Amino acid sequence: AEIIKADPIHLIEIQSMNSSDKEAWMQPTRKEYNTILENETWELVPLPPGRKAIGCKWVWKTKLGESGEIIKRKARLVAKGFTQRYGVDYNDTWAPTAKQSSVRTVLSIANAKGWSVKHSDVPSAYLKATLNEIIYMKQPEGFVIPGKETWVCRLLKSLYGLKQAGLEWYNMISSKLIEWGY
């Protein structure tokens, strides 16, 4: 299989962006696409016979400040996981999550004992988790490779929207934390 990296400078206009500030959304969209490529999230391949490719879509969000000013625009490529088929595209979706009451309890104990609490964020976390299943996804709108329009992305890493994305991230981060002695 051939890994193709599209030149983000040649971004094709994304038809679903109808807003008047379309140009302002191009930079975060390019940034997200480059992050996906840097994480080697997929390889571009012809779709094998008998397989179906799931779709994907761009999701854009605006973060506003207290007075309503735009602080940041964020683009995210999301797989249309609702089209995945059990037993073909995924087998398990379970991943642990903390209950709000548990988080409040831990914070209360930390406060009572004078402990400091630190929070960390992992940017593009799901893109760091390797997939165990073979999943094909259509090329994202605006980034279809000329001459390979019928090819699809064979996902190598997890992507937001996949049914098993949370589980794959949990498996990866928990094994790393154990490896690091936590």
Image (spheres, rainbow, N blue to C red):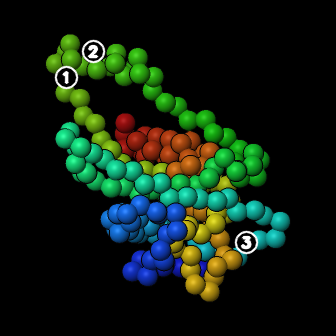
Q: Could you tell me which residue is drawn at 22 percent across and 48 percent down?
A: 69
Looking at the image, residue 135 lies above or below residue 86: below
**134 or 25: which is nearer to us?**
25
Per the image, the residue denoted by label 2 is: 109
Tell me which residue sits at (55%, 67%) in the image: 140
Q: Nearer the viewer, mark 2 or mark 3?
A: 3
Counting from the top left corner in percent of width and height, residue 79 is at: 58, 55
The three-letter amino acid code for the residue at tag 2 is Ile
User: Gap between marks 1 and 3, in whole Å?
Assistant: 54 Å
Quadrant of the snapshot with the C terminus? top left
Q: Residue furthest left?
A: 114
Q: Which residue is mark 1?
A: 115
In the rendered image, which quarter is residue 103 located in?
top left
In the displayed structure image, the side of residue 99 where residue 145 appears, left or right:
right
Whether the residues at callouts 2 and 1 have beta carbons within 8 Å, the answer is yes
**What kind of residue is marked 1?**
Trp
Q: Work out how far the residue at label 2 is from the one at label 3, CA to CA, in angstroms.
A: 53 Å
List x then y, in percent, for residue 92.
Answer: 67, 40
Residue in front for this viewpoint, 67 or 172 = 67
**What residue did someone put label 3 on?**
47
Closer to the chain start, of discs 1 and 3, is 3
Q: Position of residue 131 (x, y in %)?
A: 59, 55
